[in-house]
DNA sequence: ATAATGTATGAAACTGATTTCATATACCAG
DNA sequence: CTGGTATATGAAATCAGTTTCATACATTAT
C-alpha cells in the first residue's frame, strides 16, 4: 500500500509538493506535476482518506439516513439522492436507522468525525434538540421530514394538501362515509399531523363529521392494510371509501377486499399515497397522491451542497407540491 | 470536540493509559480505569475514527455493495445483512454501484483504506482479477454472485436448479412452447449461465428443442416485461408459457397480457423468480421460484465475520436451495 | 537471595496525510 | 540597482489516536 512518502521518493520531490499536486494547488511547475502524476500512476497510489480527514479536509462523501430501505418510498428516494450527488461528484453512504434512536446517533457521529461532509435525514428518531448540536460539524438537511418549530433546512412535500385533495376527490365522487388510515398517531406532531389536518378540512368543508372508529392509526404495510380491511368488514356501518397513508396499505386493503367479495370501487373506493410502482400493478389500478420523489431527492442534495460549500449560506424550507392521480380504485 | 489528550489531562494520566482503557487492554488498575471513564463521560468524549484507522485498528463497520437499491431483491437482501450485522455489533454502510465499474472501485478503496473492516458484494462489475488484490486489506464475501473459477468465499443460490424446476413445472403442465427471459446475456458467465443451463436441461430431458426467437436477453424491469409481451404478441407462433428471470419481468408480462386480452394462465403461463412482494399482488398471483433472501444475507454476514476474526480462516462456498412456489399464473 | 514473571504506567515514535513557515528564484516597477 | 510581488519548493509541525520501548514494582519460582 503506497503512501505519499513513496510517491515523494519515487518522484524525487517532497511530500508537500505531492500533496499540492493532489489538491490542485496553484504554483506547481508543470514538469514536476507531471513527475508526481507519473509516480502516482506507477505506484497505484490512492490517498488515505483517514489521514486526510484527520487533518481536516473534506471527504466528498455525504450520508443518508433512512428508516427502512425495504420501503420503496425510501429506496427510490435514496436512489434519486444518489444520482444527484454523483452528478456533483459526491459519493453517498446510506444507513438504515430501523427507527432506532441509538443507531441514528451512531451515524450522526460519522458527521462529527468528518467521515461524511454532510447529512440528509429522511427520518428523524431523536428530538431535534439532540440532533441540532451535530450541525456544528456539518450541514444536515431534513428530507421528507416534518419538524414544526425547528429552523433546520427542510425539503418536504405538501402533506396537508395531499390529504385534502385526496379526501376532496372522494367527497366529489359522492362519498360521505370516508375512513382514514395514517402511519403515525393521530395527534402526533410531524407530517401525519398535517395530513390529518387536510383530511379534517376536506370533511368539514363538506359538512361531514369525523367518525372516530373509522380512523386507523399506526398502519404502514400491506399486512396492515389487510388488517384494516378485516376490521372494516366486521363493522355494522361500513365506510364507503378509505383514504390510506400509503400505496402499500391501500394495496393490502384491496387484496383483502377482493378475497372477501368486496368490489373496488363500487363497494369501497380506495385512495393511496406515494404513487409507488405497486399502484399500477394492483387491480384495479390505484388512485393515489403522487409525491415527486425524484425532485425531493434532488432538491435535498442541492440544498446540502449549497450549505457545504459556503459556510453560512442561508438554508431554505422548501415545500414541493403533490398531485392527485385518478386511476380505477375510486 | 474533546480529544484523547483532553481526557488524559483531566484524568491526570497519560494518553497511552487512556487509549488502553478505550481498547480494553488488560493490566489497567481498576481505580485508574474509573478515573478515565469518568473523564470521558464528563467531556462527552468520542474517539475519532479517522485517527484510529490511521494507526490500524478496526472499525466495526462492514460495507455492502448493491447494483441498485430500488430493486426489491437487493433492498431486502441489504436489510437482512443489516439485521444480522447489527446483532453482531457491526454497522453497515451500503453503496450503490449502479453497475458502474469506477464506482465499484471507489467503494473497494474504502476497504483498502480501512474505512470498513470487510465487504459483501452482491454484484460484481469488474473482473475478479481486479477485485482480488483488495482482499489483502480485508475479507470480501460474494453474495448472490457467481464466479466460476475464483476461489473467493461465496454464498449463493442454486440458480441452475431454480431454472430447472421452473421449466420442469411448465413442462409438467403440458407446455411444449416455453419462452425464456434472462437478465444477462445468454452466453455469459455467472448466474445466468447456470440458469440457462437449468432451462436447457429441462427442455432436453423432455425432448424439446430450443427456439432461439423465444429467448429474450438483458431484461430486468417491469417495462422490459411489457416489451417482451408485445414482442410475443407480434409473433406468428406464440409460446404458451414463459419462464422469466424475475418477478418484476413476470409482472410486466402479465400486465401487458391483460391489456391485450391474453388470459393468464390459459393463453400464457408465466413463472417468475425471487418471490418478491409483487408476486402476491399481481393478479393472478405469480407462480415463482422462491429465493431464501434472509438466509442469503445471514450466511454472508456469518462468513464475513468469521473471515474478519481469524486471519486465515477457511472460506467456504455455500449454495442455498431454492424452491418452487405454485400460485395461479401457471 | 536471586531470577523470572506478571502487572501497570508513561514518553516517544508512528500512522499518512495537510499546512505553516521559511526560503529561493524570476519578473517587474521605481 | 533595489525592493516588492508572484511563483515554486521543502522541512517540520500538526491532526488524534495506537503501539513500542523503557521502566518500576509486586509476586512467584529456584
Image (cartoon, coloured by chain):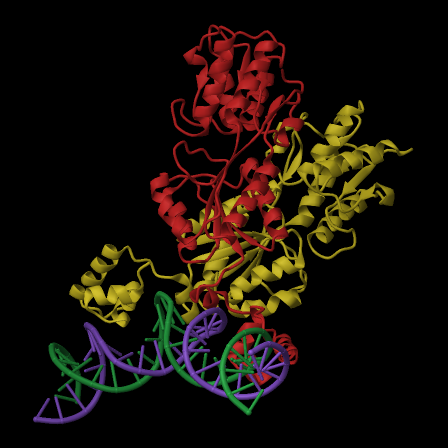
Chain colours: A red, B yellow, C purple, D green
Which residue lies most toward the right here?
B236
Q: Nearer the viewer, residue B315 or A299?
A: A299
Percent from the top left, x then y, of residue B157? Answer: 61, 50
A60 in relation to A147, above or below: below
Q: Specify whether C20 is left or right of A260.
A: left
Percent from the top left, x then y, of residue B225? Answer: 75, 36
B98 in relation to A202, above or below: below
Please indicate, yes or no, whether residue B239 appears anywhere in the rendered image: no
Q: How many marks?
A: 0
Q: Nearer the viewer, residue B238 or A309?
A: A309
Percent from the top left, x then y, of residue B278? Answer: 62, 33
Tell me which residue sits at (62%, 57%) in the image: B103
Q: Specify whether A296 is left or right of A114.
A: right
Tell me which residue sits at (48%, 47%) in the image: A313
Please indicate, yes or no, whether residue B100 appears anywhere in the rendered image: yes
Q: Specify whether B165 is left or right of A252.
A: right
Percent from the top left, x then y, of residue B305? Answer: 46, 59
Tell me which residue sits at (62%, 13%) in the image: A265
Q: Specify whether B327 is left or right of B230.
A: left
For the C terminus of chain A, the quadrant is: top right
A11 in relation to A138, above or below: below
Amino acid at each position: 500500500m503506497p503512501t505519499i512518502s513513496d510517491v515523494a521518493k519515487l518522484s524525487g520531490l517532497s511530500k508537500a509538493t505531492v500533496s499540492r499536486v493532489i489538491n490542485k494547488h496553484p504554483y506547481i511547475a508543470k514538469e514536476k506535476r507531471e513527475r508526481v502524476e507519473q509516480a502516482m500512476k506507477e505506484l497505484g497510489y490512492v490517498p488515505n482518506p483517514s489521514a486526510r480527514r484527520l487533518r481536516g479536509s473534506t471527504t466528498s462523501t455525504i450520508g443518508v439516513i433512512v428508516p427502512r430501505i425495504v420501503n420503496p418510498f425510501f429506496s427510490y428516494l435514496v436512489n434519486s439522492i444518489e444520482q444527484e450527488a454523483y452528478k456533483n461528484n459526491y459519493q453517498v453512504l446510506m444507513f438504515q436507522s430501523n427507527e432506532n434512536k441509538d443507531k441514528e446517533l451512531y451515524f450522526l457521529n460519522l458527521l462529527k468525525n468528518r467521515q461524511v461532509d454532510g447529512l440528509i435525514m429522511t427520518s428523524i428518531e431523536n428530538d431535534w434538540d439532540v440532533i441540532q448540536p451535530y450541525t456544528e460539524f456539518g450541514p444536515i438537511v431534513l428530507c421528507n421530514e416534518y419538524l414544526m418549530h425547528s429552523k433546520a433546512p427542510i425539503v418536504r412535500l405538501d402533506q396537508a394538501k395531499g390529504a385534502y385533495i385526496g379526501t376532496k376527490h372522494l367527497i366529489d365522487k359522492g362519498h360521505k362515509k370516508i375512513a382514514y388510515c395514517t402511519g403515525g398517531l393521530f395527534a402526533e406532531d410531524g407530517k401525519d399531523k398535517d395530513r390529518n389536518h387536510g383530511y379534517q378540512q376536506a370533511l368539514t368543508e363538506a359538512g361531514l363529521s369525523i367518525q372516530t372508529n373509522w380512523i386507523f392509526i399506526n398502519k404502514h404495510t400491506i399486512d396492515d392494510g389487510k388488517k384494516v380491511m378485516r376490521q372494516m368488514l366486521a363493522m355494522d356501518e361500513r365506510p364507503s371509501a378509505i383514504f390510506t397513508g400509503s400505496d402499500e396499505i391501500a394495496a393490502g386493503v384491496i387484496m383483502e377486499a377482493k378475497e372477501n367479495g368486496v368490489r373496488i370501487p363500487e363497494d369501497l373506493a380506495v385512495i393511496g399515497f406515494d404513487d409507488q410502482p405497486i399502484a399500477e400493478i394492483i387491480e384495479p389500478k390505484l388512485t393515489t397522491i403522487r409525491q415527486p420523489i425524484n425532485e425531493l431527492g434532488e432538491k435535498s442534495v442541492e440544498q446540502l451542497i449549497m450549505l457545504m460549500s459556503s459556510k453560512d449560506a442561508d438554508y431554505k424550507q422548501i415545500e414541493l407540491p403533490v398531485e392527485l392521480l385518478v386511476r380505477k380504485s375510486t
